[in-house]
Image (tube, rainbow, N blue to C red):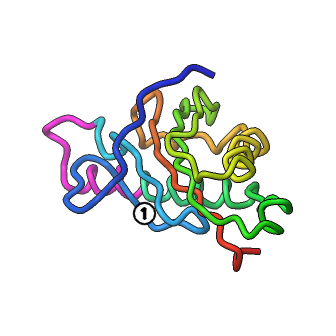
């Protein structure tokens, strides 16, 4: 898969990006989810796009969480950490690129994130309300020993 620069992780004061609390990843950040309409869009159209974006991010979070596993060797060693995954998704849910943007510091955990993406592919397709052809995300994937 090709490598692309990753969008920034969301913080306070995000404009034209959406960030949602995720489980177990805690936060998914997307660039351009609420974009795509004209300046003449009504407030209702903007709200509908935002709602579709939030629903889609929730679907992605849940889909990835279903495919995430805590590596037994990492658990046995007491390894915990967060991997930042940079992901580009096409309209149909195809993974156009996936790379580790920031390592957890543990090869087992980083490798599990790659394996998770392969198990989870294809991802849910984008809803019609989202106009873009591709979506760039940064997804923190957290591994904590108290996780299942």
Who's the residue at 49% across and 58% down the image?
A: 55
What residue range appears in magenta? Answer: 37-51
Rendered view: 1 above or below 68? above
Q: Mark 1 points at which residue?
A: 20
Q: Residue furthest front?
A: 77
Q: Position of residue 63 (x, y in %)?
A: 67, 55
Question: Few, some or many C-alpha atoms within 10 Å of disc 1 (few <14, some 14-19, many ≥20)?
Answer: some
Rendered view: 78 above or below 53? below
Q: In which quarter of the image is the N terminus?
A: top right
Residue 68, picture quadrant: bottom right
Q: Quadrant of the C terminus?
A: bottom right
Number of numbered callouts drawn? 1
Q: Position of residue 147 (x, y in %)?
A: 71, 75
Q: Position of residue 127 (x, y in %)?
A: 51, 43
Was residue 41 drawn as part of the magenta stretch in this picture? yes
Who's the residue at 34% across and 44% down the image?
A: 8
Left or right for 21, reference 93: left
Who's the residue at 29% across and 59% down the image?
A: 11
Rendered view: 36 above or below 143? above
Left or right for 16, reference 105: left
Who's the residue at 56% across and 47% down the image?
A: 103
């Amino acid at each position: 898969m090709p490598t692309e620069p990753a969008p920034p992780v969301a913080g306070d004061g995000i404009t034209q990006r959406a960030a949602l609390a995720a489980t177990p990843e805690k936060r998914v950040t997307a660039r351009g989810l609420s974009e795509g309409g004209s300046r003449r869009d009504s407030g209702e159209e903007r709200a509908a796009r935002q709602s579709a974006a939030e629903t889609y991010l929730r679907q992605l979070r849940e889909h990835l969480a279903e495919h995430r596993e805590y590596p037994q060797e990492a658990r046995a060693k007491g390894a915990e950490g967060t991997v930042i995954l940079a992901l580009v998704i096409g309209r149909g849910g195809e993974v156009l690129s996936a790379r580790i943007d920031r390592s957890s510091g543990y090869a087992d955990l980083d490798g599990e994130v790659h394996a998770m993406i392969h198990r989870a592919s294809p991802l849910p397709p984008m809803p019609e309300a989202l106009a873009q052809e591709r979506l760039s995300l940064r997804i923190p994937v957290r591994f904590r020993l108290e996780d299942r």
